[in-house]
Image (cartoon, helix red, strand yellow):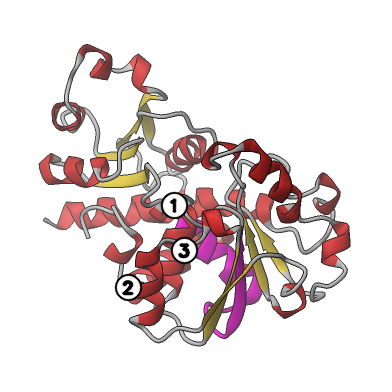
Amino acid sequence: MKHLIDSTDLSVEEIDSILNLAQHIIDNKEDYSEVCKGKKLATLFFEPSTRTRLSFEAAMMELGGNVLGFSSADSSSATKGESVGDTIRVVGCYADIIAMRHPKEGAPMFGAMVSSVPIINAGDGGHNHPTQTLTDLLTIKREKGRLDNFTIGLCGDLKFGRTVHSLIKALSRYKNIKYILISPKELRVPDYIITEVFEKNNIEYREVSTMEEVMEELDIIYMTRVQKERFFNEADYVRLKDTYILDETKLKYAKKDLSILHPLPRVNEISTKVDDDPRACYFRQALNGKYVRMALIITLLENAGRE
């Protein structure tokens, strides 16, 4: 495992190992304060990011390493026409590991083909976001104590949401998970997820249009933003947008131990009044992202060192 491009690059055993290491870091932070001393992480973010970029940087700093890189394509040589391949080759001369976000699907995979150091996909277009998936898995494990035997509702933009696609593929390898897909018809899960994940593996799923009709069944609800720009006309967006706002009224139907997740950023799809509800996990989820990236950096650097 030299690179992490897709959540399916990891076996279940490798995922469990990373999650266990992340938990060990949480419990023994001081033991890891100099694990990456003398190592450098390059953050190559060709599109804007707040949480993902800062959590990578915080992760490396807390491991005793250093960070270099850029936070937008405008501040890189991409503006001069430099190819992704050339950027990766050059940065590999300066850094020991690279975290890369790019608007084009497949760009990190291409980067991995030419890189001399480990590449971590920090998000490529609407395709994959594997470190967010590891964050989600760690959060579920810490909140529920397990990664199997539950019902999860995925709500909002299920068509373009890369976090949703990655999470579904990762969870599909764990036992007895039921999926309820909550979205407008315009933003349903892509057909390839239905055929290649659910149907191929005989996994139970349902597609519904409102939260209220399924809320009482859910152990976890994973909220995403319904994006205005995805609709062909504004009238459809206005008609549907309030359907996918999680508020105190909708939570009246929910289980007492429901876990509410969101990859963030939030716009208005979760009412701020929900933030104080003990079932709201999304800020704990963001913190978990730092620890899981610490575990991933350690793992990839150790594996690279063995080659």
Q: Which residues are magenta?
A: 132-155
> Helix, strand or loop at disc 2?
helix
For residue 79, which quarter of the picture? top left
Q: Earlier in the sequence, mark 2 or mark 3?
A: 3
The amino acid type, in three-letter code, at marker 1 is: Arg
Taking the magenta stretch, the answer to whether it contains residue 238 is no
Alpha carbon separation for disc pair 3 and 1: 9 Å
Question: Which label sits in the foreground, 3 or 1?
Answer: 1
> Helix, strand or loop at disc 3?
helix
Alpha carbon separation for disc pair 2 and 3: 14 Å
Residue at the spot 52% in from the left edge and 42% down from the top edge: 230
Residue at the spot 41% in from the left edge and 29% down from the top edge: 47
Residue at the spot 49% in from the left edge and 51% down from the top edge: 161
Residue 210 horizontal side relative to residue 160, left or right: right
Alpha carbon separation for disc pair 2 and 1: 16 Å
Q: Which residue is mark 2?
A: 196
Q: Which residue is mark 3?
A: 167
Q: Nearer the viewer, residue 234 or 189?
A: 234
Question: Which label sits in the foreground, 2 or 1?
Answer: 2
Residue at the spot 30% in from the left edge and 72% down from the top edge: 11
Q: Nearer the viewer, residue 214 or 129?
A: 214
Q: Label 3: few (<14), some or many (≥20) within 10 Å? A: many
The amino acid type, in three-letter code, at marker 3 is: Leu
